[in-house]
Amino acid sequence: MRFTTVAVPSCLALSLLAAGCGDSKLKGSDVEKQIMGAGTAYKSVSCPKEIEAKKGYTFTCDADTTAGAIVVTVKITSVDGDKGHMTIVKATPKK
């Protein structure tokens, strides 16, 4: 079995969207753009359409890279006003 390492950023910052009733959401398309901009290894990224903007919330995105298909695990690390910060926890080969 062969594994290839793909460099991923440790921290990304995004703007939040008001979703009514005091809940905030991240647009999946914004997360995708942030991950795509993190390096040239990414060919495409697909995240959920809306992502809960809550500290500690974890979600996954699928990505195609120059090294193959991977699953990117992302965790919301903080929410401050209309800004959200997240960290890519890991990137693993897609099975």
Image (tube, helix red, strand yellow):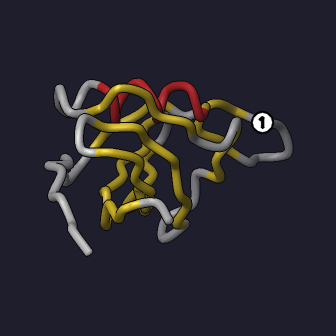
Residue at figure coordinates x 65%, y 53% from the top left: 52
- Residue that extends furthest to the bottom in the rendered view of this protein: 1
Secondary element at image label 1: loop
Q: Which residue is mark 1?
A: 19
As rendered, which of 90 and 14 lies closer to the eye?
Answer: 90
Left or right: 53 in relation to 4: right
As rendered, which of 92 and 58 lies closer to the eye?
Answer: 92
* Amino acid type, label 1: Ala
Question: Which corner quadrant holds the N terminus?
Answer: bottom left
Left or right: 52 in relation to 90: right
In terms of image quadrants, where is residue 4?
bottom left
Left or right: 79 in relation to 59: left
- Residue that extends furthest to the front in the rendered view of this protein: 1
Vertical position of residue 89 compared to residue 21: above or below: below
Left or right: 57 in relation to 40: right
- Residue that extends furthest to the right in the rendered view of this protein: 21
Q: Residues within 10 Å of mark 1 (few under 14, many from 20)?
A: few
Residue at figure coordinates x 58%, y 51% from the top left: 53
Q: Position of residue 45 (x, y in %)?
A: 46, 34
Vertical position of residue 93 compared to residue 46: above or below: below
Residue at figure coordinates x 61%, y 31% from the top left: 27
As rendered, which of 30 and 68 lies closer to the eye?
Answer: 68
Q: Position of residue 69 (x, y in %)?
A: 41, 47
Q: Position of residue 73 (x, y in %)?
A: 43, 62
Q: Position of residue 51 (x, y in %)?
A: 64, 47
Residue at figure coordinates x 31%, y 57% from the top left: 88
In terms of image quadrants, where is residue 37?
top left
| Picture mark count | 1
As rendered, which of 15 and 38 lies closer to the eye?
Answer: 38
